[in-house]
Each structure stands twice: as structure tokens, then as C-alpha cells.
Image (spheres, grey):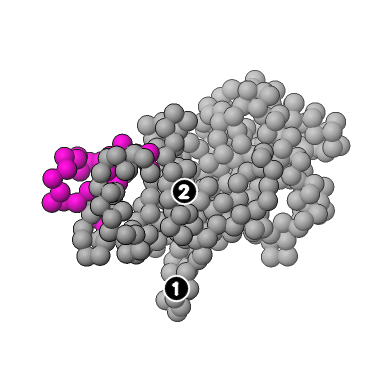
């Protein structure tokens, strides 16, 4: 059986960083499936083809029919995260080229990557009846000349999708972003994973056996404009995962004062500092009346004392605890 390292990396990324309960690699449609939304698919294919032909003189689909395009489709990795808020879907196409990705020239590279992103959107619309999601093309190294041509294409594609009523977000993760947004978050989120099916994680664990070096968790702050996507490694992690890893680590390090640990066991301080509704820390023998269901089941130990960490973290527009948690971690040198 052929095993691709790129697919293995994103299998782990989808499971541990995006917390997808369902992940599949090498997804292909079955010929027995009924295609849905065919009129929408033909329309989207037509408008994207016309747009890129008129603006860039690109033959995105090279006269392929919708049927041919979908038969060629293979999604390297697809993950679904299901929560009370709904369903998130993430689709990844990944390519490894040691010398830097270049499909026969920078223009051809831009056309092929754009086509892959459009085709992924068509698959989601036609086989899943889904009209929003994260669609990614990833490569550890893409030549700068190709990126300069590709980036405006992706920006135009996202606007085109939005203007036609779709909430897909196409993006390219490459070069430094590949490390910041993919590799580092995996190593933060998947500590302790022992699943032998995860080739990338098993390889990383093998390397760790022969050295004590750990990946840095310091953020790389890049100068960007207000509309740029953040390159912060933590931006890919859900707030609960940050709490379970960086916050837990910081508390267990013993660097937090005893006075603050005491305050963290009160609702007032926890609300003010973390914007959560329950005490951040719960001590089993405490007189505080709290429900254990509001706390992670795995205890943490601070200076020999056992506590449980609150699990009620939210990051929705009406209740966003994320900036509070990140501010505290930054003040305490964890990020």
C-alpha cells in the first residue's frame, strides 16, 4: 500500500488540530452516487471558467466537462467536525516537491492549484450538498515566483465564490506558513498520541526518543495589513485545545503564584480574567459548589495539589473567550 507523508500529516492535522471526528484520506466519489445540485455546479463551473479566461487568459478546465472534472477528483484529506454550533468541513489537497512546487511554470502552477480548489468546492456541492467549508491547497515549498501569481488568483476565487452565494474559503498554505499553521499546531495538539496508524506522529515520536528538543511555541508575529490572514500557529487551534495544552502546561509548571491559583478558584476572578462563567480551577475537596461536568476529566497537579480545569470555553461572536485566554498566556510567557 502506498503511504504519502503529506496525507499522513494532514490526517493528524485534521484529527488533532481541527478536532474532526471523521477524517478520510484519498477520498473519491462513487460512480453509484447521485449527483446533486447539477444546475448550480454547471453555473459555478461556467462563471469561474469565464472569469479566469477573461482576467488571466487561463484555461482552467481545458474544455473538460463537469462529469470529466468530477471523475478526476481525488481529495487527499477531508475532515468533518461536528458540534452544537453545526458542522465544519475541511478539504485538503497536498503536494510535496523538494525543489519547490512548480507545475511546468508559474502560470501553469496557478491554473492547476486554482482548478484543484474549484474542483473541491464542486465535490462538496455535488456530493455532500454543502455550500461552505475550508478548502486548502498545501505544500511545504512553493517557489516565490509561483506564489506571486497564485495569491491574487485565490483572492479572486474567494470573492467569486462569495458573490455567487457560497461560503467556501480557499487558501494556500506553503513555505513558512506550512510550519506555522500545520506542523507546529500538530505538535502542540497531539502530545501523547499513540495511534500507530499516524505515520507522521510515529516518525516524530521516534525523533524525540533521541533528543530533548521540543518545537517552539513562541508565536511568529509578521507584519501584515488588517485584511491578511493571521500566521499565528495558534489560529488553527480551537480554544479548548489551547486550554488543554498551553494553559494546562503553564499552570502545572509551578510558575503561577499561589495567590493567583487561589483566585482562579473563584467565579469573579475567572469571569474577569478569562471571561468564563465558572471558576477556572476546581479542587475536589473544595467547598465551592460546582458541577464536575463543567471540568475536564483529566486532573492537573500544581505544586503537588490536584485540581480540575474548566472546560467551558467559547469563541462565538456573542461570547468569545479566546482573546482573554491568549492575553493571559502572553502575560505569563507561554506564547
What is the C-alpha distance between the residues marked 2 and 1? 30 Å
Can you name the residue that lies furthest to the bottom here?
A: 210
Whole-percent x, y for residue 131 in the image = 56, 28
Whole-percent x, y for residue 59 in the image = 81, 37
Mark closer to the observer (2, 1): 2
Q: For residue 310, which quarter of the picture? A: top left
Q: Is residue 203 magenta?
A: no
- Disc 2 element: helix
Pick the front one: 199 or 275: 275
- Disc 1 element: helix
Whole-percent x, y for residue 163 in the image = 68, 24
Task: Specify which label sits upstream in the sequence, 2 or 1.
Answer: 1
Q: Is residue 240 left or right of residue 92?
A: left
Which residue, given by chain and number where applicable, does mark 2 sit on?
327
Residue 11 tag number? none
Looking at the image, is 48 positioned above or below residue 299? Answer: above
Q: How many marks?
A: 2
Q: Is residue 155 left or right of residue 244?
A: right
Looking at the image, is 303 positioned above or below residue 73? Answer: below
Residue drawn at (37%, 59%) of the image: 250
Magenta segment boundaries in residue numbering: 274-300
Residue 208 tag number? 1
Q: Residues within 10 Å of mark 1 (few under 14, many from 20)?
A: few
Marks 2 and 1 in Cβ contact (< 8 Å): no
Using the rendered image of the protein, determine whether residue 298 is visible from the camera's viewpoint: no
Q: Is residue 293 magenta?
A: yes
Residue drawn at (76%, 46%) of the image: 150
Using the rendered image of the protein, determine whether residue 111 is visible from the camera's viewpoint: yes
Residue drawn at (77%, 56%) of the image: 144
Amino acid at each position: 500500500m502506498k503511504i504519502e507523508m503529506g496525507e499522513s500529516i494532514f490526517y493528524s492535522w485534521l484529527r488533532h488540530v481541527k478536532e474532526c471526528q471523521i477524517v478520510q484520506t484519498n477520498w473519491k466519489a462513487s460512480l453509484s452516487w447521485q449527483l446533486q445540485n447539477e444546475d448550480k455546479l454547471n453555473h459555478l463551473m461556467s462563471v469561474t471558467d469565464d472569469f479566469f479566461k477573461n482576467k488571466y487568459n487561463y484555461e482552467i478546465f481545458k474544455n473538460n466537462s463537469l462529469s470529466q472534472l468530477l471523475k478526476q477528483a481525488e481529495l487527499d484529506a477531508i475532515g468533518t467536525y461536528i458540534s452544537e454550533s453545526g458542522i465544519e468541513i475541511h478539504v485538503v489537497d497536498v503536494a510535496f516537491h523538494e525543489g519547490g512546487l512548480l507545475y511546468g511554470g508559474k502560470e501553469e502552477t496557478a491554473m492547476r492549484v486554482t482548478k484543484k480548489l474549484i474542483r473541491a468546492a464542486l465535490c462538496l456541492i455535488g456530493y455532500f450538498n454543502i455550500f461552505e467549508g475550508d478548502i486548502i491547497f498545501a505544500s511545504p515549498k512553493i517557489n516565490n515566483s509561483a506564489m506571486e501569481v497564485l495569491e491574487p488568483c485565490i483572492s479572486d476565487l474567494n470573492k467569486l465564490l462569495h458573490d455567487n452565494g457560497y461560503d467556501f474559503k480557499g487558501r494556500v498554505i506553503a513555505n513558512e506558513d506550512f510550519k506555522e499553521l500545520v506542523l507546529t499546531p500538530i505538535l502542540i495538539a497531539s502530545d501523547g498520541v499513540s495511534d500507530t496508524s499516524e505515520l507522521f506522529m510515529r516518525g516524530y515520536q521516534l525523533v524525540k526518543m533521541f533528543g530533548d528538543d521540543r518545537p517552539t511555541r513562541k508565536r511568529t508575529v509578521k507584519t501584515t495589513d488588517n485584511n491578511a490572514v493571521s500566521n499565528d500557529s495558534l489560529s488553527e487551534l480551537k480554544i479548548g485545545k489551547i486550554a488543554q495544552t498551553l494553559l494546562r502546561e503553564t499552570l502545572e509548571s509551578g510558575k503561577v503564584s499561589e495567590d493567583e491559583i487561589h483566585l482562579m478558584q473563584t467565579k469573579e476572578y475567572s469571569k474577569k480574567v478569562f471571561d468564563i462563567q465558572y471558576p477556572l480551577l476546581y479542587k475536589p475537596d473544595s467547598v465551592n459548589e460546582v458541577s464536575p461536568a463543567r471540568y475536564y476529566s483529566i486532573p492537573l497537579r500544581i505544586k503537588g495539589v490536584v485540581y480540575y480545569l474548566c472546560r467551558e470555553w467559547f469563541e462565538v461572536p456573542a461570547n468569545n473567550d479566546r482573546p482573554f485566554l491568549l492575553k493571559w498566556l502572553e502575560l505569563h510567557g507561554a506564547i
